[in-house]
Image (cartoon, grey):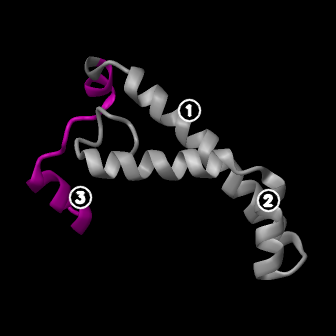
Amino acid sequence: MVARNITRSVILNSIGRFILVATRSIHAMVWALFFVAVFGPGALAGMLAIAAHSIGFTGKFLSEAIEEASPARSRRWSPPAPRRSRSCSRAIGRR
C-alpha cells in the first residue's frame, strides 16, 4: 500500500507512510509498556509489542523492494488468466 508505483492515491500513500514511520519510530519498550497496560503482563503483550515494532521495518523494506522492481519483471512473473469456461468446468469437476 505504501509503494508509489502500486498506490496511485496520494492520500492513501501518505497515510500508509505515516503509519509505518510512526510504528518504526516508537521503541519496542514503549510498545511493551502500552500493551502491558492494555492487556496485562503476559505473552500476548510481548508478542504484540514485537509485532507492532516490526511492522514498520517490514513495511518499509517491502515497499522499497516493490518500488525498485521493474514493471516488466512483475508482468513476466504473473501467470496468465485462465479462460472462464475452463475455470468453471474445473470448479464443477468436469474436464
Q: For the point 47% across and 26% down, which residue is it?
A: 65
Q: For the point 17% across and 60% down, which residue is it?
A: 89
Which is in the foreground here, disc 2 or disc 3?
2
Which one is in front, 16 or 47?
A: 16
Q: Which residue is mark 2?
A: 30
Determine which of the numbered discs, if any, sits on residue 90 in the image: 3
Q: Position of residue 25 (x, y in %)?
A: 66, 45
Q: Within 10 angstroms of label 3, few (less than 14), some, or many (20 or more) residues?
A: few
Amino acid type, callout 1: Phe
Which one is in front, 85 or 64?
A: 64
- Secondary structure under the numbered disc 3 in the rendered image: helix
Q: Is residue 93 visible?
A: no
Q: Position of residue 57 (x, y in %)?
A: 63, 40
- Secondary structure under the numbered disc 2 in the rendered image: helix
Q: Quadrant of residue 58?
A: top right
- CA gap, disc 1 to disc 2? 22 Å
Amino acid type, callout 2: Val
Q: Within 10 angstroms of label 1, few (less than 14), some, or many (20 or more) residues?
A: few
Determine which of the numbered discs, if any, sits on residue 7 in the image: none
Which one is in front, 13 or 43?
A: 13
**Span shown in magenta:** 73-95
- Secondary structure under the numbered disc 1 in the rendered image: helix
Q: Within 10 angstroms of label 2, few (less than 14), some, or many (20 or more) residues?
A: few
Q: Position of residue 14 (x, y in %)?
A: 37, 47
- Judged left or right of residue 27, residue 82 is left
The vertical placement of 57 against 33, above or below, is: above
Q: Reading the chain from its start, which is encountered first: label 2 or label 3?
A: 2
Q: Which residue is mark 1?
A: 61
Say whether residue 80 is magenta.
yes
Q: For the point 25% across and 18% down, which residue is it?
A: 72
